[in-house]
Amino acid sequence: MLSLLRINDPFRLIFPFLLLLLLWFPHTAPLQIEMRWLLVGEKITESAGLYRSVWENMMPLSAWVYEGIEAIVGRSFLTLKIIGLLLLFYQAAHFNLFLIQKDFFQERTYLPAFFYALLGSLYLDELTLTPPLMAMFFLLLVLSRVFLLADNSSDVALFKIGFYIGIATLFYLPSLFYLAWLMVGLSVFRTTTLRQYLLSLIGFLLPLLAILTYFYFTDRFFIFFQQTLFLHLKFKPFWYLSWQSIAFVVAIPLFWFLVCYLQVSLKGVFHNFQIYSQRMMLLWFLVGILVVAFTYEVGSFIFIFFVPILAFFFTHALLLIKKRWQAEIFFWIIALSSLTAYGLETYLPDFQTFIQKNKLLIQQPAPEKKSDKHLVIENKQVWVVGNDLSYYLKNKMATPYLNTDLTKNYFKNLNNYEIINKLYEDFNQNPPEVIIDLEGDAKRLLDKLPPIRKKYEQKDNIYFLKDN
């Protein structure tokens, strides 16, 4: 396999694509996080818009992509996975072709695309259309254009680089840290004037100012900050997987990154541009750690920010091995050991149960007793007070309150008249037929609204709207 990928032939990209398909097919089960994204698109499509009709920390460009998918194909988990697959393959191909174009390695090879496809599809929540994956599309444009500055430092190029980081930020907020990567890289590894720094900064701010202007004139300016930036700063991260399970699934690729980086640093002989590129890639890795530290929703999908760097150094290390048979063995050790977590997620039932307990997979509700109408929750307007979104699989979402942290923070002072009035209006405009109270907060809210509370009858932790 290694010898096939080392041939300079664009048709070798078929191997990364086949690898993606092979890894993609077993992972088609719906995920909790996919349900959240689809609900956001659904609510925006049918009502007043993002941050007003649905309370969620998602950045606007990602939300509007999900809105477009909802408008075209409806609530489709498969569509998310297919688009995610195609976007990941495009990124792998683009990344590889750019590396070939600029002669980053000692020889022209399609190993980076293979490793990009492998590392970008190891985990359940990577094999779908995630906001980080959409942001990475523009960050790869940033990566490629920064290295072109070695030959072309035009003002337009620097403006575009900042602009792409701004667009990536509007897909996934922690992407803004790559502006720091750009500024540090320009100051440490090349000569840059103050005017060029300012052009990059203006390019970064332009799309953000355009979005803020739009939200200002639609009376959502402060709500936008409350549901995005303040959520990241104020609340603890929401973990779709425990930190132990995330550490497990990324430990092997990161171990090989360390091995390959040390090999490249200690044994490699490179010209100036290759040394410059390696330093910029290492800086990218360090900024990726900042991105992970700032993120609100933590899952394996944020590993995508490290994929280009790992693919880069894996390839460098393999090409430094002179004997082809040794390189072939090392290639298969990296590839097969990296697939360990994938195999456990896909084929080991005990590990799948472990993941389910960590809020990643949607678990089908227990079989319902058809003899009791209260236990049949299908085709209803539902409000789930909690983070288990499986109840929405066969139902519609009522009320704007999707993000639990936002809801708890807003309704913590129920003695405020404006807050009570807001809750009353939401229940009158779009009353839930069923309220599933997983955390005990619904009772506290309903008790403050006696006219609303008397419309519901309670059975355990579920409230049913009475028949008129």
Image: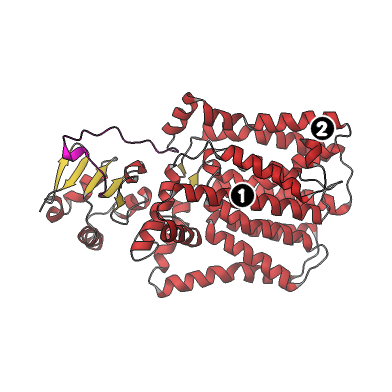
Q: Residue at x 39, y 72 (%)?
A: 218
Q: Is residue 365 shown in magenta?
A: yes
Residue at label 2?
327
Q: Which secondary structure is most common in the magenta stretch? A: loop
x, y percentage for residue 237?
Answer: 47, 45
| Region in magenta | 360-380
SS category of the residue bearing label 1? helix
Q: Residue at x 30, y 32 (%)?
A: 366
Q: Is 423 displayed left or right of 172 in the figure?
A: left
Please name the amino acid that badge 1 sits on.
Answer: Leu
Residue at label 1?
88
* Viewer can see residue 296: no
Q: Disc 2, disc 1: CB below 8 Å? A: no
Q: Nearer the viewer, residue 433 or 25?
A: 25
Q: Earlier in the sequence, mark 2 or mark 1?
A: 1
Q: Is 266 displayed left or right of 194 in the figure?
A: right
- Disc 2 to disc 1, C-alpha distance: 26 Å
Please name the amino acid that badge 2 sits on.
Answer: Ala
Quarter of the picture holding the N terminus: top right
Relative height, residue 311 to residue 159 (above, below):
above
Relative height, residue 314 to residue 346 (above, below):
below
Q: Quadrant of residue 184?
A: bottom right
